[in-house]
Amino acid sequence: MQAAEMLADEHRLIGRVMSAFAHYVDQLEKDVDFDPTDLGEFVVFFQEFVEFRHQDKEETILIPELVRAGFSWDERPISEIRRDHEHERYLVRELRYAAASGTTWSKEQRRHVVAIARELVAFLRAHIDKEELLLLPAMDRLSSAVSERIRSDFERFDRIHPAVDGIVDLETLGNRLAERYAA
């Protein structure tokens, strides 16, 4: 499997979890049939899989290779991807604070969580589209040797970072959440 396909597979899983999260947020907003502790599980997935696995691979492996190949660190698409990652980290951090504050929220706290969550859903969907349109095609401009090195580095990254805090498999967590909150 090529490196671009590996990222695209991760995008598909992230997209499934985002759809489930959107459904979860609908239930949260209506205060109907939702498990408040699941917010914490979504946050774990967003932090550990999206941020610490997917984005770290892009930022520590792919982007440096693209820069070495002539892409500018300060111009599109690299600058936009980096800026998007920072904004997404902010949104997830806000949700992490909400999840850590307990499961009994005031009406205003619930409104805030819903607003941040909806922003994250829209933002991540647009970000994935941007990566599919700008970042993955940029990989086609790399030599086959560089592409192979990226693929190998991605695989090594996944072997080195397989589990977090007792979660054996982040993909399993994502799939479980996607199934639990399938629309």
Image (cartoon, grey):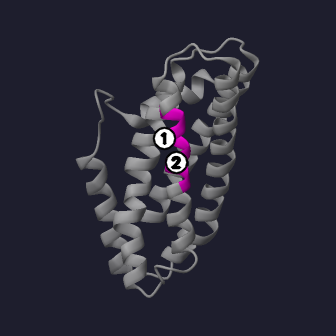
Q: Is residue 35 left or right of residue 142?
A: right
Magenta stretch prevailing secondary structure: helix
Residue highlighted by disc 2? 90
Alpha carbons under labels 1 and 2: distance apart: 5 Å
Position in image of residue 149 (x %, y %) = 30, 71
> Picture coordinates of residue 30 (x, y %)?
76, 18
- Looking at the rendered structure, the kind of residue marked 1 is Arg
In the rendered view of the protein, which quadrant contains the C terminus? top right
Per the image, label 1 sits on a secondary structure element best described as helix
- Camera-nearest residue between 157 and 85: 85
Query: Is any part of residue 176 visible from this angle?
Result: no
- Which residue occupies 43% across, 37% down? 171
- Asked whether residue 134 is drawn in magenta, I would say no
Which residue was labeled with disc 1? 93
Q: Where the N terminus falls, by quadrant?
A: bottom left
Crowd around label 2: few <14 · some 14–19 · many ≥20 (10 Å): some
On screen, residue 145 versus residue 97, left or right, reads: left
Question: Badges 1 and 2: C-beta atoms under 8 Å apart?
Answer: yes
Residue 63 rendering spot, x and y as whole percentages? 42, 71
| Quadrant hosting residue 61 | bottom left
Q: Quadrant of residue 131?
A: bottom right
The range drawn in magenta is: 87-96
Q: Residue at x 33, y 29 (%)?
A: 167
